[in-house]
Image (cartoon, rainbow, N blue to C red):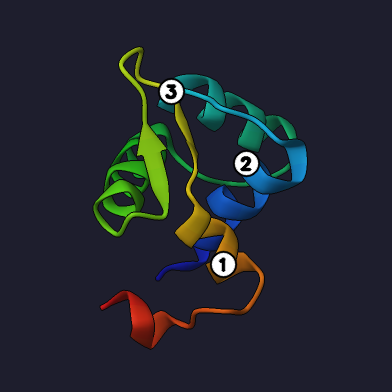
Amino acid sequence: MTMTDVIILDFLHDHDLELSPKPLYRNLVRHGHDIGYSTVRGRVRALEEQDLLQKDDDGYYELTGRGRAYLAGELDAADLE
């Protein structure tokens, strides 16, 4: 789990959004985060592999129950390996 992962998860949770990587990147930058597009694209894929994000058929990512549990402190980084 990287700091970028936490920023992405927190952002989607705090704003209750489903976004594809490009709009997610643009909104993160707009809110003051210094993150590159390729980093966002790679991290959402990694978060999907860890079942923290779910991608729909249109390419939009949203938090899963497991992602919400991580943010609530019910899972720690060791549980994700």
Residue 12 circle label: 2
- What amino acid is labelled 3 in the image? Tyr
**Which residue is depicted at the point 42% across and 27% down?**
21
Instruction: Determine whether, in the image, residue 61 is placed left or right of residue 7.
Output: left
Residue 72 appears in which quarter of the rendering?
A: bottom right
- What amino acid is labelled 2 in the image? Leu
Which quarter of the rendering shows the N terminus? bottom left
Closer mark to the observer between disc 1 and disc 3: 1
x, y (%) of residue 53? 42, 46
Which quarter of the rendering shows the C terminus? bottom left
Mark 2 or mark 1: whose residue is earlier in sequence: 2
**Mark 1 vs 3: CB contact within 8 A:** no
Q: Nearer the viewer, residue 74 or 24?
A: 74
Name the residue furthest front.
Answer: 65
Residue 69 circle label: 1
Q: Is residue 3 above or below residue 44?
A: below
Mark 2 or mark 3: whose residue is earlier in sequence: 2
Residue 60 circle label: 3
